[in-house]
Each structure stands twice: as C-alpha cells, then as structure tokens.
Image (cartoon, grey):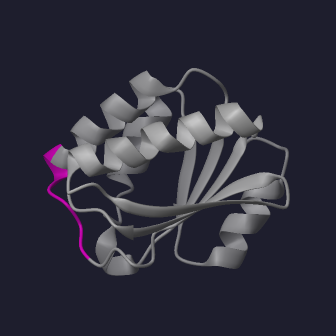
Amino acid sequence: MPAEAVFEERDGCLRVRILACESTDQLCAVAERILEECETRRLSKVLIDALAVLETMPVISYYEAGVRCADMSRRYLKVACVVQPQATNPDRFFENVLQNRGVHYRWFLDGDQAQRWLQDDRLG
C-alpha cells in the first residue's frame, strides 16, 4: 500500500500532509514525490505535516530511509517536518542520518517553529 500524502504550494514552499506512512518504502516514495514536485514547481522549501503518523518505525528503517532519501536528492532543499512526540526518536536519529548526507532537514513538535525555521534564510 502506498503512503498517503496531500501536496499544496503556499507561501513559496511545498506543503505536504502525510496521512499514513508505515514503511521505509512508503517513506521513500513520499520523498521521491516531494523531489518531483519541488523540481516541477521550482521550490526549495518543504513543510511536512506528519502529525497523522502516530508511531515510530524501527531505527534500522529510519537509517535505510535516510540513506535512500539523501541519495535521491538532486538539488538543495530545506525541509521542516512537524511530528508527534511518540512518532519520532528524541535523539534525532533520522534527522542526523539525513544531515550527515547533506540534506538540510529538521523535525519539530510545533508547526509555528517549523514555519519560522523554514522561512529563515540563515542555515541552522
């Protein structure tokens, strides 16, 4: 079953609402679609709303997904993802895997913080 996601362009960024995502393959399929949409729309900022995802995947799944997603990236993107506390690892493992491979990605528990970080043109 593919991951369910809704895409919308607003305020100069691609907004993605993930409704369901349960596997590495689903996560990578969404990432590939995000890259395609950014390329088509010529956008470099992405705000992901993953609040509907309520559980974490195994750590190895995040590692595999992070490596695969980073390998897909063909251009600069700044990606902010809003998550539920129980649906992520507090040690920021997935975030670190992506960042170590050159993807400017960060997760947040608060949508306003994510939006501010995304709009800030400074790195960090």
Image quadrant of residue 104?
top right
Q: Could you say where residue 43 lies in the image, as x and y percent from the top left?
A: 75, 40
Q: Could you say where residue 84 lies in the image, as x and y percent from the top left?
A: 41, 78
Taking 44 as reference, is 19 left or right? Answer: left
Q: Is residue 124 visible?
A: no
Taking 23 as reference, is 87 left or right? Answer: right
Q: Is residue 95 above or below residue 56?
A: above
Q: Residue at x 55, y 36 (%)?
A: 35
The residues colored magenta run 55-60
Q: How many discs mark residues in the rendered view? A: 0
Q: Main secondary structure of the magenta part?
A: loop
Image quadrant of residue 96?
top left
Q: Is residue 68 above or below residue 59?
A: above
Q: Is residue 34 visible?
A: yes
Q: Residue at x 38, y 78 (%)?
A: 85
Residue 4 in the magenta stretch? The answer is no
Taking 113 as reference, is 32 left or right? Answer: left
Between residue 89 and residue 78, name the one nearer to us.
78
Q: Could you say where residue 45 lies in the image, as x and y percent from the top left?
A: 72, 46
Q: Residue at x 82, y 56 (%)?
A: 119
Quadrant in the picture for the N terminus:
bottom left
